[in-house]
């Protein structure tokens, strides 16, 4: 009878934990096991016997680590959890392990062969369809059965369902090491690409994952055996295949750091790098800025820029989201493509109650601190601090990327006009920190107070003489409780400028909000948005051609002002939700696109401003929703 894994309801436990795993996490867990076994060489290869015998391509993970004897092997793989390691603290490598990350998508089995002092031991874990439990199968050895065997003592030649497991280990594994073979399931017998139900279907997806999950693997020889074609009938039939179109490719995996500052290219190079301390030196932001063309590494590593959190030499929360770059003051697509920011926050400390720690899945990073516990990392807060301390090299790259856009708005008249007209209506409550301590009896004080301004103006310190107040309240900030008073203050009208279509999440979007922009809070208008192109075409056709550029200038300027007004007015929503929630829900590109597509208000304002151009043509143009094209003249200034 097969030996069940020593947890009641193990299959339910495994499957539930498996759902928390990310793509290719089985590779992470197995590689971590190899590294913790002091391996100097790890190969994620192909089991070639199954290719020849069954036409099946199975993924193998082999290493030259310390290996396990028969007792250690059974103990490690017949118990879910930490194997032969005790359960440690939140910073120890305990949680979703290799078994949990690999068993659910390999119901036909996971075979483990381990060698210690040249003695081999083998087990196979399968899913019993009848009991729905994971079990170690029992092999016939002479007149008895055993769930752990020496593969060299069994005659595999007569087996119709097995390969010769004694011949699976690579030649370079001599004395100590371990080999894991993934057998897949009835519906997906090929495991070389990974779990097909988990989106792991790219021929180089495994290499990309390892090169972006692990920070530095240069001290260990990690190799991924890749296929060269997406077409299965073009896959190699042996490791010795010599056809260039079919032969396997042995890819050295070096980790993310190598692809940032360990390579060169004919058309570009790493121009600058540095470190910016954030959050009172509890977070370091390493940045890498490339100049020119990045090397063509996109098929096996990250080519374009990204942001990630480094924790114990692994990268988590990797993102290339344009909105996330804007939190760091990086709006321009050209800069986003060439800039990588690696955040390394302090690890959670029980004494200070501040820091990051992984969740049990080892797939996400949590943050605890500043009154919160186990939440998502405060990326927008750290982004604000980074934008305030923007390195000069990044700032210069931003200005260079904007050099071909002369449509930035420098005229402050529109902001003054709007502030004068709506300033009294656009008021919000803000807390002002007193420079003095409150009196015991609440007596009068004539001292100045200092505003604890919102994150959009956090880099500016506001000083002003205020009327005397009789009672001071307190509010908790990073430094503890501070005395102060709440007052109604006008909302500042942001600036606007023009941007490239590639800076937007979709090229048809009209505007984006960049509160942490290097030049201050900006609304960026996509002058090439089809919505604006159609609007400009509609109004240009109503006036003589001599006014074409002026029509374009008026329409783009009107949309810029309207968008700036909507951002300013939406500040009042911070009475009900946090400013981050306002940005995420009401100031995102989709929300701005919908709010700016109304024809009544915008068209009425445009017509008023176009009236100064004189009489319209007799024949009216098509409605702006009809298909049309026109050069918008994004270089025109307001």
Image: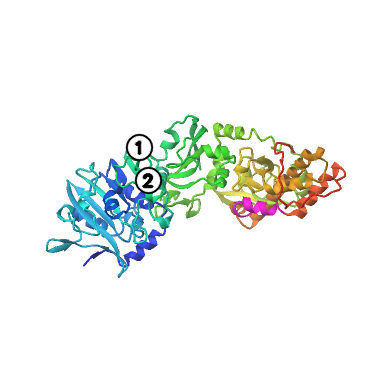
Quadrant where the N terminus sits is bottom left
Vertical comparison of 544 with 365: above or below: above
Residue 180 horizontal/vertical position (percent): 28, 51
CA gap, disc 2 and disc 1:
23 Å
Q: Main secondary structure of the magenta part?
A: helix
Reply above or below: 85 against 385: below
Front: mark 2 or 1: 2
In the image, what residue occupies the spot 64% across and 47% down?
A: 512
Residue 215 in the magenta stretch? The answer is no
| Residue 590 is one of the magenta-drawn residues | yes
Mark sitting earlier along the chain (2/1): 1
Q: Residue at x 87, y 44 (%)?
A: 615
* Callout 2 secondary element: loop
| Front-lying residue, 284 or 29 | 29
Q: In the structure shown, which secondary structural element does the residue marked by tag 1 occupy?
A: loop
Q: Nearer the viewer, residue 294 or 461?
A: 294
> Which residue lies under the disc numbered 1?
218
What residue is disc 2 on? 227
Which residue is located at x 74 percent, y 37 percent? 411
How would you rate the neighbour count of disc 2 (Cα within 10 Å): few for under 14, some for 14-19, many for 20 or more? many
**Which region is colored magenta?**
583-597
- Position of the C terminus, as image quadrant, is top right
Other residues around mark 1 within 10 Å, as few (<14) / some (14–19) / many (≥20): few
The x, y position of residue 576, in whole percent, is 63, 58
- Any part of residue 281 in sight: no
Q: Position of residue 542 (x, y in %)?
A: 82, 46
- Residue 553 drawn at (x, y percent): 76, 40
Which of the 4 quarters of the picture holds residue 328? top right
**Residue found at the far left of this picture:** 143
């Amino acid at each position: 009878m097969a030996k069940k894994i020593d947890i009641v309801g193990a299959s339910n436990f495994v499957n539930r934990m498996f759902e928390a795993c990310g793509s290719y996490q089985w590779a992470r867990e197995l590689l971590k096991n190899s590294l913790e076994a002091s391996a100097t060489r790890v190969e994620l290869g192909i089991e070639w016997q199954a290719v020849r015998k069954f036409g099946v391509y199975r993924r193998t993970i082999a290493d030259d680590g310390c290996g396990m004897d028969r007792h250690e092997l059974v103990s490690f793989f017949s118990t879910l959890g930490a194997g032969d390691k005790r359960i440690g603290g939140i910073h120890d490598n305990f949680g979703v392990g290799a078994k949990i990350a690999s068993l659910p998508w390999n119901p036909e089995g996971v075979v483990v062969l381990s060698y210690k002092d040249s003695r081999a031991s083998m087990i196979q874990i399968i899913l019993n369809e009848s009991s729905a439990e994971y079990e170690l199968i029992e092999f016939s050895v002479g007149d008895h059965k055993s769930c752990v065997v020496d593969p060299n003592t069994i005659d595999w030649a007569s087996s119709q369902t097995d390969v010769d497991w004694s011949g699976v280990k690579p030649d370079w594994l001599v004395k100590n090491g371990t080999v894991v073979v993934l057998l897949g399931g009835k519906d997906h017998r090929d495991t070389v690409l990974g779990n097909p139900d988990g989106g792991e279907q790219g021929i180089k997806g495994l290499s990309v994952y390892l090169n972006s999950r692990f920070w530095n693997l240069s001290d260990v020889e990690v190799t991924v055996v890749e296929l060269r074609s997406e077409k299965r009938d073009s896959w190699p039939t042996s490791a010795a295949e010599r056809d260039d179109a079919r032969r396997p490719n042995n890819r050295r995996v070096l980790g993310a750091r190598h692809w940032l500052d360990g390579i060169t290219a004919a058309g570009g190079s790493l121009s600058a790098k540095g470190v910016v301390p954030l959050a009172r030196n509890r977070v370091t932001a390493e940045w890498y800025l490339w100049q020119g063309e990045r090397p063509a590494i996109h098929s096996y590593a990250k080519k374009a820029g990204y942001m990630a959190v480094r924790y114990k030499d692994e990268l988590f929360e990797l993102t290339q989201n344009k909105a996330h770059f804007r939190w760091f003051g990086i709006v321009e697509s050209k800069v986003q493509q060439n800039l990588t920011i690696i955040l390394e926050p302090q690890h959670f400390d029980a004494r200070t109650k501040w820091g990051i720690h992984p969740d049990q899945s080892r797939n996400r990073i949590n943050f605890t601190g500043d009154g919160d516990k186990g939440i998502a990392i405060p990326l927008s807060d750290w982004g604000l601090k980074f934008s305030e301390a923007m390195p000069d090299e990044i700032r210069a790259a931003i200005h260079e990327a904007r050099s071909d856009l002369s449509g930035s708005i420098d005229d402050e008249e529109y902001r003054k006009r709007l502030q004068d007209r709506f300033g009294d209506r656009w008021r919000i409550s803000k807390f002002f920190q007193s420079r003095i301590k409150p009196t015991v009896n609440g007596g009068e004080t004539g001292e100045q107070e200092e505003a604890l301004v919102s994150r959009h103006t956090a880099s500016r310190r506001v000083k002003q003489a205020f009327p005397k107040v009789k009672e001071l309240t307190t509010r908790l900030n990073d430094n503890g409780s501070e005395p102060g008073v709440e007052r109604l203050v006008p909302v500042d009208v942001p600036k606007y400028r023009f941007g490239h279509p590639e800076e937007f999440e979709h090229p048809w979007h009209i505007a984006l909000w960049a509160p942490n922009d290097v030049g201050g809070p900006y609304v960026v208008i996509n002058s090439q948005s089809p919505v604006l192109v159609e609007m400009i075409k509609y109004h240009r056709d109503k006036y003589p051609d001599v006014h074409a550029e002026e029509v374009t200038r008026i329409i783009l300027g009107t949309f810029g002002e309207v968008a700036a007004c909507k951002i300013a007015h939406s500040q009042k929503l911070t009475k009900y939700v946090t400013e981050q929630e306002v940005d995420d829900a009401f100031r995102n590109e989709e929300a701005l696109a919908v709010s700016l597509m109304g024809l009544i208000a915008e068209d009425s304002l445009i017509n008023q401003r176009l009236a100064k151009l004189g009489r319209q043509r007799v024949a009216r143009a098509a409605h702006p929703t009809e298909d049309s094209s026109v050069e918008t003249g994004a270089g025109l200034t307001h």
